[in-house]
């Protein structure tokens, strides 16, 4: 065997080793979810007898108990409407300044873009004090305050959409202006559809982030009836320390996980394609 053949054989061995290593890593990530699913279908007695065994009886009633008795149903619907509204306002609040900065030249535009970049250098925890006082003085310790917090337009999502808008030819807008369209018409009817990939990517990330958000709802939501599923689960975890009904807790966690898992599975390809296209255009 010549030297090049030995090199190819060595490369194949290295590649096989890396693939096996990544497979083991993937299994280590997936296994906790499988374990949680299996134990969510056990009776509490079966769970404490052997946490590694399969269920002797498939206790689907754990999901009913989590939905009703543990009030996960209320938290779930709170998260659904807040995530829907929050995702829409987040995308629009990011798309509008991104479009203006990318396509309109005015005094201070570079300063605004620079401030967006500088904002990444400020630790989030460093803004907690002023943010808390502002919310308190404005009386926004309620769902409206949470949604406003999600609508900060100058940030990561704005920079992503900026790269998309930057790659769109202005000739489309000029043609629309000649036909009598105004600036808002051009934005909503011409430019937004052209950056559909970026909108989908940003909306997916925003949706996942808002659904899983724990910090803002914990601070701003004062009533238990307003809690999102992330906050509700944290209180359920504390409650299970005393009642030790862990199978219901695992069922509640799966109820919280399923929507995001489905969204990511459906949108995964569009998500990666959107960011790739945005990177190439930018």
Image (cartoon, rainbow, N blue to C red):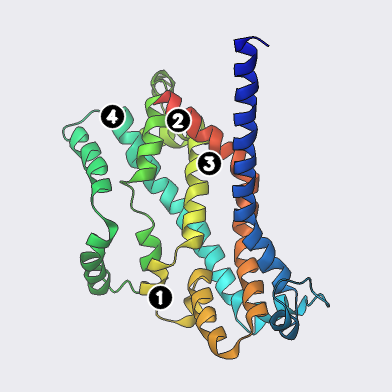
- Residue mark closest to the camera, 3 vs 4: 3
Residue annotated with mark 2: 278
- The residue positioned 58% from the left and 76% from the top of the image is 74
Query: Cα distance, mark 1 to mark 3?
Result: 29 Å
Query: Cα distance, mark 3 to mark 2?
Result: 12 Å
Is tag 1's residue or tag 3's residue first in the polypeptide sequence?
A: 3
Residue annotated with mark 3: 200
Where disc 3 sits, the SS reads: helix
Marker disc for residue 54 = none
Closest to the observer, 215 or 238: 238
Is tag 1's residue or tag 2's residue first in the polypeptide sequence?
A: 1
Query: Cα distance, mark 4 to mark 2?
Result: 19 Å
- Residue mark closest to the camera, 4 vs 2: 2
Is tag 3's residue or tag 2's residue first in the polypeptide sequence?
A: 3
Where disc 4 sits, the SS reads: loop
Residue annotated with mark 1: 221
Where disc 1 sits, the SS reads: loop
* Quadrant where the image shows the N terminus: top right
Discs 4, 2 touching: Cβ within 8 Å: no
Please indicate whether residue 265 sits to the left or right of residue 159 in the image: right
Image quadrant of residue 157? top left
Q: Position of residue 106 (x, y in %)?
A: 20, 31
Find the residue positioned furthest to the bottom. 242
Please indicate whether residue 251 sits to the left or right of residue 270 in the image: right
Please indicate whether residue 109 sits to the left or right of residue 74 in the image: left
Q: Residues within 10 Å of mark 4 (few under 14, many from 20)?
A: few
Residue annotated with mark 4: 104
- Residue mark closest to the camera, 1 vs 2: 2
Query: Cα distance, mark 3 to mark 4?
Result: 24 Å
Find the residue positioned furthest to the right. 57
Q: Residues within 10 Å of mark 1 (few under 14, many from 20)?
A: many
Q: Position of residue 4 (x, y in %)?
A: 61, 11
């Amino acid at each position: 065997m010549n030297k090049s053949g030995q090199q190819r054989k060595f490369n194949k061995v290295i590649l096989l080793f890396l693939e096996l290593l990544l497979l083991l890593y993937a299994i280590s990530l997936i296994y906790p979810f499988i374990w949680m699913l299996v134990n969510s279908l056990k009776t509490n007695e079966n769970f404490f007898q052997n946490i590694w065994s399969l269920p002797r009886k498939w206790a689907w009633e754990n999901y009913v108990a989590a939905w009703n008795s543990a009030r996960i149903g209320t938290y779930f619907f709170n998260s659904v409407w807040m995530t829907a509204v929050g995702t829409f306002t987040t995308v629009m609040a990011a798309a509008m300044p991104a479009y203006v900065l990318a396509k309109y030249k005015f005094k201070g535009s570079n300063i605004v873009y620079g401030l967006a970049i500088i904002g990444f250098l400020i630790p989030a925890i460093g803004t907690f004090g002023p943010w808390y006082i502002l919310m308190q003085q404005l009386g926004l310790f309620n769902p409206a305050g949470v949604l406003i917090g999600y609508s900060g337009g100058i940030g990561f999502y704005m920079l992503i959409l900026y790269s998309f808008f930057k790659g769109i030819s202005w000739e489309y807008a000029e043609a629309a202006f000649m036909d009598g369209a105004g600036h808002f018409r051009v934005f909503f009817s011409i430019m937004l559809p052209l950056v559909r990939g970026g909108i989908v990517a940003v909306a997916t990330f925003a949706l996942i982030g808002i659904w899983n958000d724990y910090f803002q709802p914990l601070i701003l939501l004062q009533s238990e009836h307003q809690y999102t599923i992330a906050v509700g689960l944290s209180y359920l975890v504390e409650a299970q320390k005393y009642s030790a009904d862990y199978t219901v807790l695992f069922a509640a966690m799966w109820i919280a996980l399923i929507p995001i898992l489905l969204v990511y599975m459906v949108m995964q390809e569009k998500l990666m394609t959107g960011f790739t296209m945005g990177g190439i255009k930018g």
